[in-house]
């Protein structure tokens, strides 16, 4: 059976399973709502379904699912502490199927709390101009995964782009362009290209960086810059398309992208 680490109400923020020593923690901000996330590092997040449905088709569908007889609607509010206490009453085997033992809507996002927290912040504050997530560029890849997984709307994606573009003071435009290729986000790539200068795009070893681009992106860049097919083995140098590479790349790689 599970035991609670502290007997005192709100102070009982950790549930310890006697077999696995698993501890459930409550997020200090996301503590109340009718949808509850349990992350891979066992942190409980609670959020209002109405806020989630504003940005996510997954949660819009969830809100429309009829509940079976005897089970309360997902619109019922519940605190993280209540779910925390419920977990303390269940066996290890029952934790993975918590939905059978509670009226709460429980979601397992298959990511850690360091990823879920900024994603929920984007959900709640997507249209806030002053929002600044302050997370490393590489960590945005996992946010893209959640955006795709839960069918987030264009407003959410636009907010995600804005957060990434805030990083231009820390990273070169080419680094962000490479990131855009890795997640295959052509809208972000086109936005980066618009304010990219020749100096920033080619500084710091262009041939080394072009190899880091996702294959179709790398090919398009090479063809636009040199008006030729790539020949990396022989290190062949072609005439540099100095005046029109940016225009040609915008047409060949981003011609179907509208901003």
Image: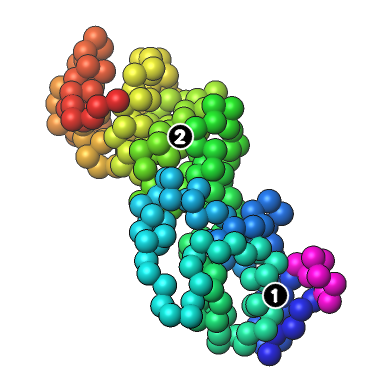
Residue 75 location (% of width, % of height): 51, 61
Name above or below for residue 63 compared with residue 5.
Answer: above
Q: Is residue 8 magenta?
A: yes
Q: Residue 199: where, in percent of width, then height?
A: 40, 15
> Is the image coloured rainbow, by chain, by secondary structure, or in one colour?
rainbow
Mark 2: few/some/many CA within 10 Å (<14, 14-19, 20+): some
The picture places residue 5, in percent across and down from the top left corner, at: 79, 76
* Quadrant containing the N terminus in the rendered view: bottom right
Q: Which residue is mark 1?
A: 85
- Residue at figure coordinates x 14%, y 31% from the top left: 229
Q: Residues within 10 Å of mark 1 (few under 14, many from 20)?
A: many
Element marked by disc 2:
helix
Q: Among all residues in the image, which is located at the extreme bottom?
A: 1
**259 w.r.t. 94: above or below:** above
- 1 vs 2, front mark: 1
* Helix, strand or loop for disc 1: helix
Q: Which residue sits at x=37%, y=69%?
A: 66
Vertical placement of residue 57 versus 34, above or below: above
Mark closer to the chain start, 1 or 2: 1
Residue bearing mark 2: 159
Residue 31 drawn above or below residue 161:
below
Q: Residue at x 36, y 32 (%)?
A: 188
Image quarter for residue 179? Answer: top left
Look at the image and tell me whether residue 89 can be seen: yes
- Give the x, y percent position of residue 164: 48, 33
Magenta-tinted stretch: 6-13
């Amino acid at each position: 059976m599970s035991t609670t680490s502290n007997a005192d109400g709100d102070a009982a923020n950790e549930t310890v399973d006697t077999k696995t020593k698993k501890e459930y923690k409550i997020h200090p901000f996301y503590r109340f709502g009718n949808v509850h996330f349990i992350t891979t590092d066992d942190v409980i997040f609670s959020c209002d379904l109405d806020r989630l449905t504003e940005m996510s088709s997954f949660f819009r569908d969830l809100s429309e699912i009829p509940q079976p007889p005897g089970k309360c609607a997902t619109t019922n509010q519940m605190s993280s502490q209540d779910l925390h206490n419920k977990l303390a009453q269940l066996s290890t085997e029952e934790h993975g199927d918590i939905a059978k033992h509670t009226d709460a809507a429980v979601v397992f996002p298959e990511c850690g709390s360091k990823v879920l927290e900024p994603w929920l912040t984007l959900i709640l504050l997507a249209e806030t101009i002053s929002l600044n997530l302050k997370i490393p560029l590489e960590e945005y890849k996992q946010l893209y995964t959640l955006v795709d997984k839960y069918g987030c709307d264009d407003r959410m994606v636009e907010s995600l782009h804005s957060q990434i573009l805030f990083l231009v003071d820390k990273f070169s435009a080419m680094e962000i362009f490479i990131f855009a290729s890795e997640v295959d986000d052509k809208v972000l790539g086109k936005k980066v290209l618009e304010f990219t200068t020749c100096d920033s795009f080619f500084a710091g070893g262009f041939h080394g960086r072009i190899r880091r681009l996702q294959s179709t992106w790398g090919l398009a860049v090479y063809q636009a810059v040199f008006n030729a097919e790539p020949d990396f083995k022989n290190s062949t140098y072609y005439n540099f398309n100095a005046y029109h590479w940016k225009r040609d790349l915008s047409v060949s790689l981003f011609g179907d992208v509208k901003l």
